[in-house]
Image: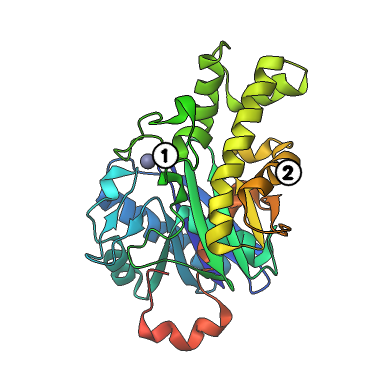
Amino acid sequence: MRIGIDLGGTKIEGIAIDDQGGERLRRRIAAPRGDYANTLTAVCGLVRDIEQTTGATGTVGVGIPGTISPATGFIKNSNSTWLNGRPLAEDLSRRLDRPVRFANDANCFALSEATDGAAAGADVVFGVIVGTGTGGGVVIHRRVLVGANAIGGEWGHNPLPAARGGESPGPPCYCGRSGCIETFLSGPALARDYVQSGGTSLTAQQISERAAAGDALADATLARYEERMARALASVIHLLDPDVVVLGGGLSNIERLYERVPKLWGPHIFSDHVATRLVRAMHGDSSGVRGAAWLWEPHDDQRRNRGTRGA
Ligand SMILES: [Zn+2]
């Protein structure tokens, strides 16, 4: 049995899946916001609850906001700021008395979709979460690409490629720079662009609905969004040449992206033909917790005693 934990800012979700990905159990609890000690207690309690209810023990993988610094072993880059600088990996492994694997939540999303989701069977997968932010994760042959700094896939903080006119220097980003891809492709960024072009304050979903109903302003805003996404993904295709790009998060529900963005990325890509597919996530909001569970694979059993972590 594999246990996956999705450690979110407002909720902690746990799941148990079997070798085929079948769901045995799912639990969701409120996250102890701002409280590291109680976060540890809550995660351990969730694992024990799952094991007692199923009567089985499992491997444990945890999806976290941010990542574990290879330099220090502590959490960094988390918007759940009470986790930053904390030895979460060491503390949880000790309390649960087993090696525990961790991955950034966008990496878990990509792993879930690459394992048994919309990109199942693909060798190279780039997963993107477009919602309140813009996260990314790379999975190659069903393995998360972590990287030397544990920021593999953090594409949202690259500058928007080929920025033009009002796109440069671009809006300020919470990371300290300006004009990051995230400041153009997140849900708040789409809403801001609609307001700046003369619209009212609407959510990304509402803008999408208005565009579908024939609102020219909403349509033009979405068209700009699609062209920016095409430019941003073209740079990923040049570097990784993925078989599949999977979109998750709230904006992945905008149906027209899947038809229009691949038509727009061609001129930016140095290839006579682009075979990369752009698809919508299959597991939706469950991909984070499922990907955490998939951090352990059957052939990992021999490795378990070596205490591999930080996958
Ligand atoms: Zn940024």
The residue lying at 59 percent from left, 74 percent from top is 141
- The answer to whether residue 226 is seen in the rendering is yes
Image height check: is 100 above or below 34? below
Name the residue rendered at 29%, 56% in the picture.
Answer: 75
What's the amino acid at mark 2?
Answer: Lys
Query: What amino acid is labelled 1 in the image?
Result: Cys
The picture places residue 81, in percent across and down from the top left corner, at 28, 43
| Residue at screen point 48% across, 89% down | 302
Could you tell which of marks 1 and 2 lies nearer the N-terminus? Answer: 1
Compute the Cα span from label 1 to label 2: 23 Å
Q: Nearer the viewer, residue 33 or 66?
A: 66
**Dot label at residue 180:** 1
Q: Is residue 38 left or right of residue 14?
A: left
User: Which image quarter is the C terminus in?
Assistant: bottom left
Q: Residues within 10 Å of mark 1 (few under 14, many from 20)?
A: many
Residue 37, image x and y in percent? Answer: 25, 52
CB atoms of marks 1 and 2 within 8 Å: no
Colouring of the image:
rainbow
- Residue 146 percent coordinates (x, y): 42, 66
Q: Is 239 displayed left or right of 90 in the figure?
A: right
Query: Does ligand 1 reach within 8 Å of label 1's beta carbon?
Result: yes
Mark identifier at residue 66: none
- 271 left or right, relative to 228: right
- Secondary structure at badge 2 equals helix
Q: Is residue 264 above or below residue 61?
A: above
Residue visible at 43% across and 60% down in the picture? 152
